[in-house]
Structures are given as structure tokens and as C-alpha cells.
Amino acid sequence: MPNSDLLPSLLFKINENQLALEAAILELSNWVEARGSTEVADNVRGALDTINMNEEFIKTALAVLMTPE
């Protein structure tokens, strides 16, 4: 596999990891909130909003990179 083919696959896997971490962190923020730390949970969700805002662009860019020329 040429190096140029590795980049889209690498970025796809990094994005998968990022989304998995987002899900795990969201679960932790829900757990924290259930124990009374609403402010901390809100702060965590606010930080996770960045991932959500960028998700569509990342998906689109990966689709373009993974499309054969």
C-alpha cells in the first residue's frame, strides 16, 4: 500500500478514536451530573460541542480523501 493511501485510512481511524473518546467522556459527564456536579458536567459537554461542530466537516473531508481518483 503506497504511503498516499495510508493517510486517509489513518485519519479515518483517528476520527473513530476521537468519536469513541467523545462517547466515553459523555458517559462520564452523565455519571458526574447524576452525582450532583451539574456545573462540571455542563463544562464537559461544552467542550464536547467542539467535536460535534467539526464532525460533519471531518466526515466530508475523509470521504473526499478516501474516494479513488
Image (cartoon, helix red, strand yellow):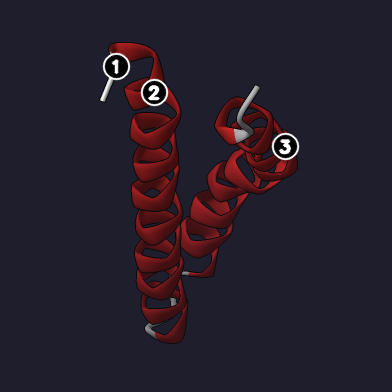
Q: Position of residue 21 (x, y in %)?
A: 35, 55
Q: Which mark is residue 18?
A: none
From the image, tell me which residue sits under label 3. Answer: 60
Residue type at numbered disc 3: Thr
Residue type at numbered disc 2: Asp
Q: Position of residue 56 (x, y in %)?
A: 73, 43
Mark toward the viewer: 2 or 3 = 2
Q: Residue at x 40, y 74 (%)?
A: 27
From the image, tell me which residue sits under label 2. Answer: 5
Q: Residue at x 49, y 63 (%)?
A: 41
C-alpha gap between disc 2 and disc 1? 5 Å
Other residues around mark 2 within 10 Å, as few (<14) / some (14–19) / many (≥20): few
Residue type at numbered disc 1: Pro
C-alpha gap between disc 2 and disc 3? 17 Å
Q: Is residue 8 above or below residue 27?
A: above
The residue positioned farthest toward the bottom in the image shown = 34
Q: Is residue 6 above or below residue 48?
A: above
Q: Which mark is residue 2?
A: 1
Is 6 or 32 nearer to us in this picture?
6
